[in-house]
Amino acid sequence: MKTYNIFNFDHRYKTPQEIITDSFKIIITAQHCSNLSKLSKNSSYTFTLDHNFTPVVIDNPAEEGEFVITAIVEIDEEKLDKSFLYPEELERGYIYDVTLVLSFLTGRRVYLENEMDRYSNKFYIDGPVTINSLLFRQITISNIKKIADYGLDTQFFNTVQSYSINDLLSLTSYCNSSLDKLFTGWAKQNKKTKFENQKYLNSLRDSAYESVLKSLASKVKVIFLKLLFDSNIENRITEDIKARIRIDTSPSALYKLKEFLKFYSLYPEEDSDENNEKLKWLNRIRNSVAHSGDLPRDNQISWMTRSEITTNITFLMLSIIQWYFAYVILEIKNHRLDETQNEIKNYFITGKFRNKDIFNETYNEYMNRIIDDWTDNHKL
């Protein structure tokens, strides 16, 4: 057996524990529990009652914190000496898979001592699950291997990396590439890369294509007749125009994404134009960031509003990715995942995600609304 000190692992335990899984053991001492208070903290709000039982909201400022040992991981390296998630990095063993999975679940990057000098990023976001006594015992080696077996090791790593990014366009780019891999891989596996009547559609396309080409060839000849004296040049121009005319009868990325979401009950069963418009916004942001590295352009919407919408939908995409890895791949059972599934579906129905109106409400308006609701409606 070999033991490793791990840093920045936010296990939430207040008393010593030994958590045994089928491939490793987590040992948490009283000192490790105490060390949790030294970790960095994001700014937050606490909704509570004061000594007079009056509802109040406490604004908790961010704390820089430090890196401390919060647990020990024990692994039998005679049986588990190789990494499944870093197959090309031979110096990495199974312990690196374990810390990556713990990072994914908790929202904080978990480090080994030999990584501290190279990385050590204290920024974090919320993980996909509620930390409880059953969570870490659900981690199995077969499901960790499944990440690699599905060809998703890079996307899993990128998802964890995205937790440490405090930049919108970079985060959106990470989410774009990971989500694209998830739904296109699913579409291929579930035969959604072709329509059922694909051959018939192709024949219709070819007929239309030939008709358009003949028309174009005729028009080009008329328009350039006085300018083109060399028939070879004329043919070359015509062929150039032909090469840029294509009708793709394969399912679009938007179609495959919708089928993926519907399959996992992340999209409403009864479709509508309103649902589709919200899906198109997601796709619009994906395309804009992927192709231009910028927010979607829209003269009718201010830059600030577009920025807020992009932020909200980026976290929607991240939630889809987190849910898929946690629920489908790692097979974690946790009530927070059920809530997330409903919240994602609700976005397509109402335009709200986690109770925030994505298109009609700024972050400040949202926070003021929920603060007012707490102080006005929770009096005893």
Image (spheres, grey):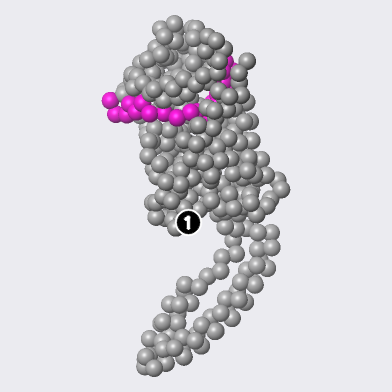
Q: Residues within 10 Å of mark 1 (few under 14, many from 20)?
A: few
Coordinates of residue 330 in the picture (x, y in percent): 57, 30
Coordinates of residue 293 in the picture (x, y in percent): 38, 51
What quarter of the picture does the N terminus occupy?
top left
Q: Is residue 89 above or below residue 81?
A: below
What quarter of the picture does the C terminus occupy?
top right
Q: Quadrant of residue 206?
A: bottom right
Label count reads: 1
In the image, is 11 to the left or to the right of 119? right
Can you identify the residue that label 1 sits on? 300
In the image, is 299 to the left or to the right of 268? left
State the predominant SS element of the stretch in magenta.
loop
Residue at 41%, 25% (x, y): give it.
Answer: 42
Q: Is residue 142 above or below residue 195?
A: above
Q: In the rendered structure, does residue 212 fall within the stretch colored magenta?
A: no
In the image, is 196 to the left or to the right of 296? right
Residue 123 visible in this rendered orientation of the protein: yes
* Residue sitting farthest toward the left: 117
In this rendered view, identify the residue nearer to me: 146 or 343.
Answer: 343
* Residue sitting farthest toward the right: 270
User: What's the magenta region?
Assistant: 117-142
Under mark 1, the amino acid is Gln
Residue at 44%, 22% (x, y): give it.
Answer: 59
Coordinates of residue 346 in the picture (x, y in percent): 63, 40
Residue 143 visible in this rendered orientation of the protein: no
Residue at 36%, 93% (x, y): give it.
Answer: 229
Q: Is residue 369 above or below residue 57?
A: below
